[in-house]
Image (tube, rainbow, N blue to C red):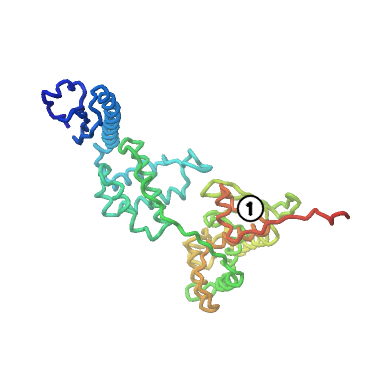
Amino acid sequence: MTPRPRGAKNADLAQYPGLGRYKDGRYYVEHPTTGRQASLKTCDKQVAIRRWAAVYKAWDAERGDLVAERIATKVSNLGNIDSSMSIEQLLKTWRTEQLEKDLVTAKRGARKGKSISESTKKDYRSDCMQLEREVIAAKIKLNSPRLIDELRKLISPWSNQPTHYNGLRNTLSRVLSWAVLMGNLSRNPIVDIEKAVENRREVLIPDDHYVAITAELMVHQHNKQEFDGEWRARICDLMYMLSQSPIDIFGLQESQISDPDYTDAGVKYSGSITIKRAKTGEKVIIGMNTELRETIDWFRQWKREQHLISPCLLVYPKYLDSRSRGKPVTHRTMSSWWLEARTKAQAKHKFTEAYQLRDLRKRGLTDEAIAAGHATDKGAHATEAMRNYYVLDKPPKRAGNTLTRIGR
């Protein structure tokens, strides 16, 4: 705002912008932007000039900050000005030009700096294609002034599925980080979209419920015939005893099994199984006790009796069709059988908890922790927090007494 022209009586104040004098002789200052006036409470010109100087310096700094803020806002938007690409186009471009060409690398964990794992790649691909199909994705432009709100709306349909919602958010973040790197965005807007709160699944399958469910798996109804389904119940036993992620158990190969007995820290083991986690790359060597060894040997013998030749330990039996027999058992199929068996067991034994196949991992790691007195490394987790996450029943603290009666 330009200061109003000075009257002849205030001509001597021309070199002091914003300084003025009332008719009664008091001096005042006038704000350069708002035009509001404030008395300096003095009729002495020199005192007024000193007070004006202090006030004007503060206002000048304030005006400088305002200008700087406006410039910063302009600059922050420069990355979006020439970017009219839609989110749908961006997702498809990243998926085809980066993901499918193995140019996407892990940002943390054992694979940091290396190409992401196949399972992660599969998840990214699935997420991208799901978001690309959304009608709103074609309408959202990278240069939209409401980009954050529109992205939040894009993934909002899955807000009642916290795990999947956070997965989609994570995929969007990777894609938009690439857009920043390519100069199409000045910053990643996903940082302003909060993650959904995921409720921790705290379910431990009681012994009697586990026995009831696996009893239903012992008989396999297939093509209106009954077959021996012990191999299905044995898979559940193996999942509990190994306590690993499904992807690592169903992908277990016989080459990962070492037969020679050995002793470690005074404990004798009947061979070992080496697992490198698909998710984190962490490696764990699990010494086999008698029961785990018996289960491994049972599957080997069962394959021989079925005349099935495969490097994988867990395969479908010969009574299935030609497309399945001898092929590796999948987590999806085994989960569907578990669900069917659990439903039958619930009807017979009157329990309501919806146990899932993946709950066997937490039951196994919790039992190991209680036996050891602390969370163990059996789960091959990269952090202490994740080791504790899988232990649902806090192990009691243990201590030995070394004291004797006083004076004895």
Residue placed at 20% from the left, 32% from the top? Answer: 30
Residue 158 lies in quadrant: bottom left
Q: Nearer the viewer, residue 236 or 184?
A: 184
- Residue 367, given in percent of the width and then of the height, sits at 63, 61
Secondary structure beneath label 1: loop
- The amino acid type found where label 1 is placed reads Thr
- Residue 230, given in percent of the width and then of the height, sits at 59, 69
Using the image, determine if residue 318 lies above or below residue 76.
below
Residue placed at 52% from the left, 64% from the top? Answer: 357
- Residue 115, given in percent of the width and then of the height, sits at 46, 41
Residue placed at 74% from the left, 50% from the top? Answer: 263
**Residue tagged by mark 1?**
376
- Residue 124, given in percent of the width and then of the height, sits at 40, 49
Q: Nearer the viewer, residue 261 or 66?
A: 66
Using the image, determine if residue 144 lies above or below residue 311.
above
Describe residue 226's horizontal placement relative to residue 54 as left or right: right
Q: Quadrant of the C terminus?
A: bottom right
Describe residue 404's horizontal placement relative to residue 311 as left or right: right
